[in-house]
Image: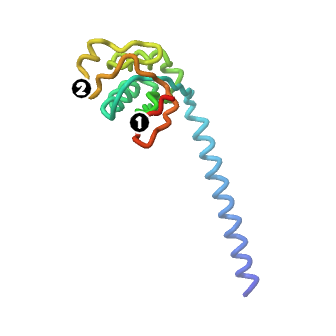
Amino acid sequence: MKKVILSLAIIATISFTSCKNEAKQNVEKTTINKGIANADVSFGVRGNCGMCKQTIEKAANALDGVINANWNVNKKKIDVSFDDTKTDATAIHKAIAASGYDTEKESGSEDAYKGLPACCKYDHEMAMNQSGEETAGGHTNHN
């Protein structure tokens, strides 16, 4: 009886290990088959608030090839992941600028800026791409 139980345990372990390895191979093949050429870029974008965040990220994400865009209100910086066979950093700068926001390389569209809500009217001289260290009051430390 002990031999039968031991034999079943060994067979179950071998089967489980085999399935586990097969699943791992399938994941690797799927990753290879996707073939997406990824690139990442980070740069400064002027803005003030959560509404700015929504507009800035929406402008970047609207580009074909952008996988993810995340703008940090404290750092005045956006991080973008994209498929570099479909778009590039210049196109991302231009899309954000067209929505009314200054980037490190493009000035925001004046017409779009005029249409922004009052809370989104940023200082055109504000520092971008900051360290993002916060003071106790929640404001960026500019030391």
Q: Position of residue 110 (x, y in %)?
A: 29, 12
Closer to viewer: mark 2 or mark 1 = 1
Q: Position of residue 142 (x, y in %)?
A: 48, 29
Q: Give the side of residue 18 with respect to residue 125, left or right.
A: right
Which of the 4 image quadrants contains residue 72? Answer: top left
Q: Which residue is mark 1?
A: 139
9 in relation to 47, above or below: below
Residue at x-position 50% and y-position 23%: 43
Q: Amino acid at mark 2?
A: Pro
Q: Which residue is mark 2?
A: 117
Residue at x-position 46% and y-position 28%: 78
Which of the 4 image quadrants contains residue 68? Answer: top left
* Contact? badges 2 and 1 (CB < 8 Å): no
User: Who is closer to the viewer here, 95 or 18?
Assistant: 95
Q: Position of residue 143 (x, y in %)?
A: 51, 29
Q: Amino acid at mark 1?
A: His
Label whose residue precedes the other's in the sequence (2 or 1): 2
86 in relation to 36, above or below: above
78 in relation to 97, above or below: below
User: Who is closer to the viewer here, 30 or 91?
Assistant: 91
Dot 1 lies on which element?
loop
Dot 2 lies on which element?
loop
User: Farthest right residue?
Assistant: 3
Q: Give the side of residue 11 with respect to residue 87, left or right.
A: right
